[in-house]
């Protein structure tokens, strides 16, 4: 068993900080987008929040009792939270460019099931696969010994489906952006190609004789960023596509705050974003030591027997 201790602290703290900052920045800079997205995607975003809470709680509660059923229950809770949150996040993100029903007041006029289509479901599965491969490569950097080898083997296995689903979804996003958002193919295709190449390199770096875990981790991270960048490149100059009434789409201009508010937000972001990045980098530096497995304790009965 690996004693993680506080080793996951920078990861969870970082996710928590950026999630809150992203929501706050969206509300301040694009209030119309925030209102429409958080009303139309309310159930999806609430599910993401609940699943993230369940995931974090499962780590703590699993250790409260030694019963097999108790531990299995919280292990399943952890699995559901870890898979469910990125899946719904991918579905929600893909809907920005795929389009959702909006009326002339830019208000969501559909229901929760309107968020699901073949494209958005594949997007959710692709995000899960990429995140799993990314997490496995991260474990190869954070652990040592047998656990590290197991993580490396898992990364090799996960890199294949992650690359397949990732390449499929970024290519599909190029098509969706062209068809649903009247976007030129070339700008989106360039970003999609970068994401696809990163995924192919991630597969290679997990398989070469001299393992390059750091490079594999960087490539899966670049692929995750590449998918998001592909969506928003295909989305520009809109922030939320309306389907089937394309004229009701939210654009950067009709969703943004006033000029003064945007200037203030820009100044605040320019000052505090580097500070947050420095703090987060420092926490990763503090927790940089690899985690090592500890041998199981020898009971007194075993000691007496010897």
Image (cartoon, rainbow, N blue to C red):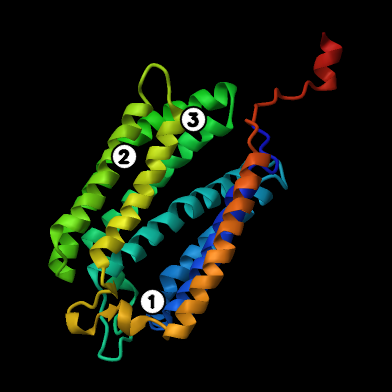
Residue 29 drawn at (x, y percent): 45, 77
The CA span between labels 2 and 1 is 30 Å
Which of the two discs, 3 and 2, sits closer to the camera? 2
Mark-to-mark CA distance, 3 and 1: 37 Å
Q: Are marks 2 and 1 in contact (CB under 8 Å)?
A: no
Image quadrant for the N terminus?
Answer: top right
User: Can I make out residue 54 in this image?
Assistant: no
Which residue is tagged 2?
Answer: 198
Which secondary structure, mark 2? helix
Q: Which residue is mark 3?
A: 151
Q: Secondary structure at mark 3?
A: helix
Residue 184 visible? The answer is: yes
Q: Residue at x 72, y 45 (%)?
A: 65
| Precedes in sequence: disc 3 or disc 1 | 1
Q: Which residue is mark 1?
A: 37
Crowdedness near tag 3: few (<14), some (14–19) or many (≥20) residues, C-alpha within 10 Å: many
Vertically, is 78 above or below 135?
below
Residue at horizontal 62%, vertical 43%?
Answer: 284
In front: label 3 or label 1: 1
| 165 versus 104 height, above or below | above
Pointer 2 or 1: first along the chain? 1
């Amino acid at each position: 068993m690996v004693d993680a201790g506080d080793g996951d602290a920078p990861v969870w703290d970082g996710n928590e900080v950026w999630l809150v900052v992203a929501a706050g920045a969206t509300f301040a800079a694009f209030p119309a987008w925030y209102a429409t997205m958080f009303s139309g995607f309310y159930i999806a975003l609430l599910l993401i929040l609940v699943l993230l809470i369940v995931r974090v709680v499962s780590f703590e509660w699993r250790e409260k009792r030694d019963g097999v059923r108790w531990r299995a229950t919280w292990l399943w809770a952890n699995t559901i939270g870890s898979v469910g949150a990125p899946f719904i996040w991918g579905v929600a993100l893909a809907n920005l460019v795929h389009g959702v029903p909006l009326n002339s007041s830019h208000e969501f006029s559909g229901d929760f099931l309107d968020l699901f289509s073949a494209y958005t479901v594949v997007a959710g599965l692709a995000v899960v696969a990429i995140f799993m491969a990314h997490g496995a490569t991260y474990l190869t950097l954070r652990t040592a010994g047998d656990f590290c080898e197991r993580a490396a083997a898992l990364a090799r296995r996960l890199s294949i489906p992650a690359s397949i689903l990732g390449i499929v979804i970024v290519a599909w996003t190029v098509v969706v952006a062209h068809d649903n958002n009247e976007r030129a193919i070339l700008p989106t295709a360039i970003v999609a190609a970068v994401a696809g190449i990163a995924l192919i390199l991630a597969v290679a770096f997990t398989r070469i004789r001299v393992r390059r875990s750091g490079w594999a981790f960087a490539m899966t991270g670049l692929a995750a960023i590449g998918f998001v960048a592909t969506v928003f490149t295909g989305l520009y100059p809109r922030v939320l596509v309306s389907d089937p009434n394309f004229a009701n789409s939210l654009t950067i201009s009709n969703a943004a705050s006033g000029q003064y508010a945007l200037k203030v937000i820009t100044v605040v972001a320019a000052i505090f974003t580097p500070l947050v990045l420095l703090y987060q980098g420092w926490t990763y530096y503090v927790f940089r030591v690899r985690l090592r497995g500890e041998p199981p304790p020898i009971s007194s009965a075993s000691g007496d027997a010897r």
